[in-house]
Amino acid sequence: MRVLIDACVLYPTVMREVILGAAKLGLFEPRWSDRILEEWARATVKLGPEAEVFARGEIVMLGAQFPRAIVPVHQGQLPRLWLPDPDDIHVLAAAVSGSCDGILTMNAKDFPRDTLSEEGLARFDPDGFCCRMLEEDLLGMRGVADGILATARVMSGVDWTMRNLMKKARLPRFGKSLA
């Protein structure tokens, strides 16, 4: 299954690590465009200039880990596509160009299911998607989540529980399933 990942899913660190952990397990093939990656990098600016530099480094590493993930957006498609927010049309165009099965986004209102289905696409929310990946590979996803939890504890100095960390990462059902 090919899934286009929206910038709003790539930007929160814990959410991104869970999603990409599932991709590393081979549970799905991630896709994104250069513009989506640029949106992620620019979103980190509010955390300070170092955060953007760090994000750009992560983007380079993603390119090495998932060399087939970048999809070109065919500009000729843009005029025929419609979404409630015109700024998101490039996401839909990338999903179509990448022959994706769906778009993983937190912006449900900006990606109406009926509009996506006209293009043969589904819309996935990150929490439900992670729960689905957990059903497909319980041990693998448990390992991914345990690694993220351990890293979060070390980096933050907080003794996170799995449930609380995933709730903070906007993956409450996934966290509850792991607890």
Image (cartoon, rainbow, N blue to C red):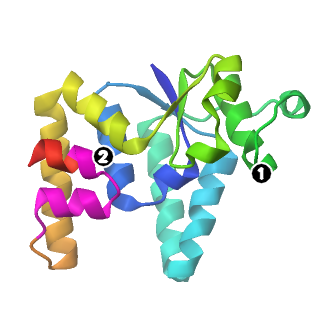
Q: Nearer the viewer, residue 154 or 64?
A: 154
Q: Position of residue 111 (x, y in %)?
A: 64, 39
Q: Main secondary structure of the magenta part?
A: helix
Which amino acid, by three-letter code, is at mark 1? Asp
Q: How many marks?
A: 2
State the residue position of label 2.
Answer: 18
Q: Position of residue 168 (x, y in %)?
A: 29, 64
Residue 19 visible in the picture:
yes
Work out which quarter of the rendered image holds the N terminus and state it. Answer: top left
Judge whether 1 appears above or below 81 on screen. above
Q: Which residue is mark 1?
A: 87
The answer to whether residue 23 is left or right of residue 88 is left
Residue range highlighted in magenta: 160-174
Magenta span contains residue 46: no
Residue at position x 60%, y 51% from top? 37
For the residue marked with disc 2, what is the amino acid? Answer: Val
* Kind of element beneath mark 2: helix
**Residue 94, relative to residue 85: is it above or below?**
above
Residue 153 % position (x, y): 14, 69
Within-10-Å neighbours for mark 1: few <14, some 14–19, many 20+: few
| Whether residue 77 is situated above or below residue 85 in the rendered picture | above
Distance in Å between CA atoms under marks 2 and 1: 26 Å
Judge left or right: residue 112 versus residue 18: right
- Residue at coordinates 36% horizontally, 53% vertically from top-left? 15
